[in-house]
Image (cartoon, rainbow, N blue to C red):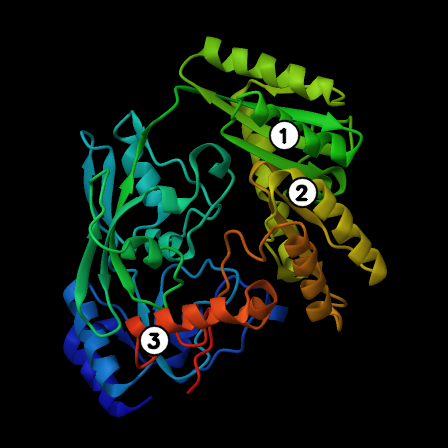
């Protein structure tokens, strides 16, 4: 790392907030991308920890003038390598920007700095006794800024939507160092192009989000967990659009199969409590009171049984609900050590069963197993391509391309919530035509003419 870069960063944030020692920066050189698919990081970096927007602005202005790359970094929970430094750069860690600035109960908003962990936000809102932030993308250690730039989804998207539906305002440092404010607590805004929505899902290539205003909701008074076992996959999956057609929208609807759920249970030393069935819908119902909850449960039960359910089981006790949630939540952790890559293809919800059948055929073709589970009500499926003897299989890229193509053929996309990052840049031409990619590159150049902001992520610009 150039001495002048180090000295400039220390002048801006103080020497205590610049990490130069390689041993101390190891945790900043990777994210949660499975190791066999993880981009190789460089160690020719420094980690800089600004405390506010002004310091970020100064850092970015210097980097832009010096044409020196910057990677904004949150908690490192991403799954497609977006936060991994693959060339000499400044890793700009947002961890010190962790203040919840305001909970506005009159306008149903919360304003916080980008480095606030999701868990901290939940805890603060618990103190209000009535307001809550519905999205739950999975890892509660994820930073709010990271959720925004990835446009995270999660299990509750079926009822409340994805992160994009909750972002009301942003404060952003542009790649040239200027600070702009976008949106706010307002409900309507037709003042020029919607740059705020362009920032959401931009994966750190258009600017650095320092402050976020999010929309809040009144927290439901009651929730109940249902487990619905089926013998056949398609019976379970076909139940969901029927449920939605009849006007029933649960808090979340997840699809799981017996082999995966038992593997997860064994992984955390628990026992799956349901003996019947090979395929399951895991449904969480929310409402204002017990009567409303149980009316919904009755409606769901009737729809499920009309569509081939073996039974409809209600987990009334909180301990049983938690046990089932723990098992469902650990499917990923059970599979992750043996995963070469984790995909998140998304198709129209009614096509999920067909996509799973196609994935099974691909697995049979390559004599492997591709376990898959996901958010069936919004069509988002997570297939895992497994390792062979601990290494990425020779057919990894071929399988990815075939799974992506099946999703595209069914009217879907290659990523619903994880993003393109660095690992899927090469797959972008499979999903988008040449003109579409040209427009993305053009937008990148307008915001970041010197290509300093997280280069090599989402789109590759010509040097």
- Camera-nearest residue between 401 and 443: 443
Task: Give the residue drawn at x 76%, y 36%.
Answer: 233
Left or right of 339: which side holds 160? left
Classify 427 as above or below 239: below
Q: Residues within 10 Å of mark 1 (few under 14, many from 20)?
A: many
Relative image position of residue 139 (x, y in whole percent): 46, 48
The outermost residue toward the front is 435
User: CA separation, marks 1 and 3?
Assistant: 43 Å
Query: Where, by quadrant of the figure, is residue 56 drawn?
Result: bottom left
Classify 253 as above or below 176: above
- Whichever of callouts 1 and 2 sits on the residue coming sooner in the sequence is 1
Q: Residues within 10 Å of mark 3 (few under 14, many from 20)?
A: some
Local SS, label 1: helix
Mark in the foreground, 3 or 2: 3
- Camera-nearest residue between 180 and 85: 180
The residue that label 3 is drawn on is 445
Viewer can see residue 391: no
How many numbered circles does the render carry? 3
- Whichever of callouts 3 and 2 sits on the residue coming sooner in the sequence is 2
The outermost residue toward the top is 291
The residue that label 1 is drawn on is 240
User: CA separation, marks 1 and 2?
Assistant: 10 Å
Local SS, label 2: helix
- Camera-nearest residue between 292 and 183: 183
> In the drawing, what numbered circle is on residue 352?
2
Kindly indicate whether the residue at mark 2 contacts the one at mark 1 (C-beta within 8 angstroms): yes
Local SS, label 3: helix
Viewer can see residue 148: yes
Relative image position of residue 200 (x, y in whole percent): 36, 55
Query: Where, by quadrant of the figure, is residue 72 drawn?
Result: bottom left
Which image quarter holds the N terminus?
Answer: bottom left
Task: Give the residue drawn at x 63%, y 25%.
Answer: 242
């Amino acid at each position: 790392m150039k001495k002048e870069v180090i000295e400039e960063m220390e002048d801006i944030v103080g020497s205590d907030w610049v990490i130069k020692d390689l041993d101390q920066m190891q945790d900043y050189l990777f994210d949660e991308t499975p190791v066999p698919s993880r981009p190789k990081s460089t160690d020719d970096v420094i980690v800089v920890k600004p405390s506010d927007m002004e310091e970020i602005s100064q850092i970015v202005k210097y980097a832009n003038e010096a044409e020196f790359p910057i990677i904004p970094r949150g908690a490192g929970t991403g799954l497609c390598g977006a936060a991994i430094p693959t060339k000499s750069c400044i890793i700009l860690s947002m961890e010190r920007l962790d203040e919840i600035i305001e909970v506005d109960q009159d306008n149903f908003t919360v304003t916080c700095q980008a480095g606030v962990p999701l868990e901290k936000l939940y805890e603060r809102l618990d103190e209000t006794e009535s307001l809550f932030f519905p999205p739950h993308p999975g890892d509660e250690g994820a930073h709010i800024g990271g959720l925004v730039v990835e446009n995270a989804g999660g299990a509750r998207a079926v009822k409340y939507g994805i992160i994009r539906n909750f972002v009301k305002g942003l404060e952003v440092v542009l790649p040239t160092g200027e600070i702009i404010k976008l949106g706010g607590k307002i409900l309507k805004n037709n003042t020029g192009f919607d740059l705020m929505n362009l920032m959401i899902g931009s994966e750190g290539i258009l600017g650095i989000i320092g402050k976020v205003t999010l929309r809040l909701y009144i927290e439901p008074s009651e929730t109940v967990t249902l487990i619905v076992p089926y013998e056949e996959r398609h019976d379970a999956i076909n139940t969901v659009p029927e449920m939605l057609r009849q006007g029933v929208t649960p808090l979340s609807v997840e699809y799981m199969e017996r082999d995966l759920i038992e593997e997860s249970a064994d992984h955390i030393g628990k026992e799956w409590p349901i003996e019947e069935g090979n395929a399951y819908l895991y449904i969480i119902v929310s409402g204002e009171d017990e009567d409303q909850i149980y009316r919904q449960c009755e409606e769901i039960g009737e729809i499920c049984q009309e569509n081939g359910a073996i039974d409809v089981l209600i987990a009334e006790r909180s301990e049983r609900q938690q046990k089932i949630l723990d098992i469902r939540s650990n499917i990923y952790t059970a599979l992750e050590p043996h995963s070469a890559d984790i995909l998140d293809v998304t198709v129209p919800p009614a096509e999920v069963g067909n996509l799973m059948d196609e994935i099974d055929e691909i697995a049979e073709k390559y004599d492997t197993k591709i376990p898959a589970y996901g958010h069936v009500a919004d069509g988002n499926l997570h297939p895992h391509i497994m390792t062979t003897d601990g290494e990425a299989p020779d057919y990894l890229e071929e399988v990815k391309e075939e799974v992506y193509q099946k999703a595209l053929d069914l009217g879907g996309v290659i990523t619903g919530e994880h993003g393109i990052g660095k690992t899927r840049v090469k797959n972008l031409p499979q999903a988008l035509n040449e003109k579409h990619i040209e427009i993305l590159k053009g937008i990148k150049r307008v915001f970041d003419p010197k290509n300093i902001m997280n280069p090599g992520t989402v789109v590759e610009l010509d040097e």
